[in-house]
Amino acid sequence: MIKQLEVVRREHLKEKPDMATLGFGTVFTDYMLSMDYNPEQGWHNAVILPYQNIELSPAAQVLHYGQAVFEGMKAYRTGDEVRLFRPEENFRRMNQSNARLNMPEVDIDFMVDTLKQLVTLEKDWIPTGEGQSLYIRPFVIATEAYLGVRAATHYKLLIILSPVGAYYGSDHLLATKIYVEDEYVRAVRGGVGFAKVAGNYAASLMAQTRATELGYDQVLWLDGVEQRYVEEVGSMNIFFVIDGTVVTPELNGSILPGITRKSILELAQHLGYPVEERRISIDDVFEASQAGTLQEIFGSGTAAVIAPVGSVKYKDQELVVNNGQAGLVTLDLYNHYTGIQNGTEKDPFGWCVKL
Amino acid sequence: MIKQLEVVRREHLKEKPDMATLGFGTVFTDYMLSMDYNPEQGWHNAVILPYQNIELSPAAQVLHYGQAVFEGMKAYRTGDEVRLFRPEENFRRMNQSNARLNMPEVDIDFMVDTLKQLVTLEKDWIPTGEGQSLYIRPFVIATEAYLGVRAATHYKLLIILSPVGAYYGSDHLLATKIYVEDEYVRAVRGGVGFAKVAGNYAASLMAQTRATELGYDQVLWLDGVEQRYVEEVGSMNIFFVIDGTVVTPELNGSILPGITRKSILELAQHLGYPVEERRISIDDVFEASQAGTLQEIFGSGTAAVIAPVGSVKYKDQELVVNNGQAGLVTLDLYNHYTGIQNGTEKDPFGWCVKL
């Protein structure tokens, strides 16, 4: 395992974009990290170099067989202070994804150290506006030029950085409208749903397109076996506040084990909310709505942070939750969570890694 | 839709490999086809150019979200005569895969014409030994540099060519050993199992690795809902000869609609064998084996053509079929099928497209 990192400087830095109008994932910083893997050397050739196109063989396995995993995390800046949020958790999950796709594991400590160096170098790219941050995208792709179907021998890991605003546009606490997908299936137990692998996202596009066309923001996926139990939203895990309890579907092999999900569960408990991880059917959700015990719904994810859900459409029924507004529990969790990330609030969990 | 094709010649042709020792998918020819898509121009910039690396943005969506589909087909040469096998079927299926991943369709006639030109140019690369052919790999990848999860706006289609021998090594009629996977799941109805999309193959790697470690050649996948019904083998569809009838699992949304599968069904009927497409459970297979009515098993696919199966392992049971040898029906189908492909036998179906 390599322990040294080369840095190749660029001659001219890019012009920074207008940070006031940042979208999501279109602007990239001056540098990226690149690292290679082969069976003889393991991970090697770790280098921070100018952000640039990469060259691949047209037979590279990632292009044919989708052997690719990724992670998403964020860096926050307040004044001169820069924080990473639980970066070791992301590299730990990357290794779970790597294992599921027969890909080599990375050294978590080395990756966190390397990321710290990269983000330090790119500190000026971290926007400081409300809801803004530097989005960090580590990913691993199979680069071997071979058309047989088997795990590749050669890989490339890259980390690219993008200054971002709120994922769902300017008003990050505007409640989203959710469409429950009852035909397409995202994942099933025994599959790769719990891993952050490329193919899961390709498989989700049709349903997302249909939901958008019907006027909804996001898809809520049901389980692949019975198409009855709530799993997750397109790019978020999902939480319900039912009768004062914060409920989220239990991890079952087809749900992504979100780091925001895990952190929200810890934070909610810390704040004194009862929490439950359990199987919850879409019928349960509609029954709770009719019984008047469904108080709030929100999604959680690195990109979206905490996003209130205002309504849920399932077949010919549609429920509105909390009059289509962000609820008190959602707002309470949002405020504490972003406060910890931004450093305006104490971090009782030791989640933030300061640079 | 573009109707013209540019050809960029290379100065020096590569040295041809030793055709006697060809493997699968490691050697590529002198040229490839490249074509681009954007919303303004549709598919454009179709060019035959020297086989070479491609350049991608590190944010290209294929690398993150697996928006990629592919096809596999073969060209055969006998003397000066070159044949493509049902190429329009492959581009039709590519369009089904494209549609499932929200990707733009291609013009089938244009693609077949273009492929003919490419293969004509590369005619000398088509090996003529027993079981050899030129493997043709068309694929489409999302190239847009954007980290949001939605269908990309920009794509690249490439066709690369590789002279190949038998997929399972030198003796293409040696019976394979099959391991029935009862934990991992490849696909489920409502998912993308019926489409030839990259992520399906990444999801299959762990099971294949386990099967290989246990001494088996291929994985037999069961359905994702009940994990009970036979679906397909790693890179092939599967057929059973039970009591004189050629049986294959019916297409159900999670099984790949193989072009070899479809052709074998047509050929078997033509030869007078009763055929059935129906749901068949793994228990049915073992019961037929015990009852003495399971006569043969074989797999079918472009890469493997027709591959006899000698044994099937499921949990703690293992059945041997036809004493672990290729059976008479399998051999009869193999001989006629490869005869039609090679042009040594009449083609009553009009499957072959001569160049």
Image: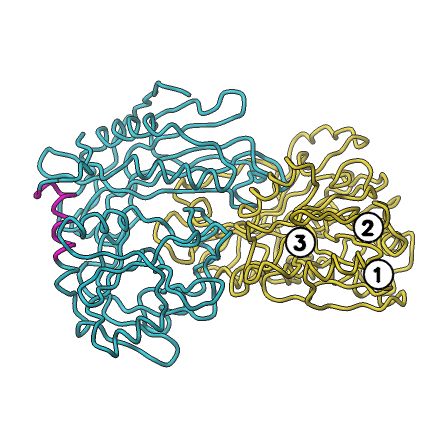
Chain colours: A yellow, B cyan
Mark 3 belongs to chain: A
Separation of residues labelled 2 and 3 (CA atoms): 44 Å
Residues in magenta? Answer: B332-345
Left or right of residue B303, residue A153 in this image = right
**Dot 2 corresponds to which residue?**
A321
- Helix, strand or loop at disc 3? helix
Drawn side of residue B31 relative to residue B70, left or right: left
Q: State the CA–CA distance, disc 1 to disc 2.
A: 10 Å
Relative vertical location of residue B62 with respect to residue B36 in this rendering, above or below: below
The amino acid type found where label 2 is placed reads: Val
Of residue A51 and residue A277, the one placed in the foreground of this image is A277
Q: Residue at x 24, y 78 (%)?
A: B291
Query: Disc 1 designates what residue?
Result: A293
The answer to whether residue B165 is above or below residue B147 is below
Q: Amino acid at mark 1?
A: Thr
Question: For the point 84% across and 55% down, which residue is it?
Answer: A337
Q: Which residue is mark 3?
A: A114
**Residue at the location (80% across, 57% down)?**
A290
Q: Is residue B86 visible?
A: yes
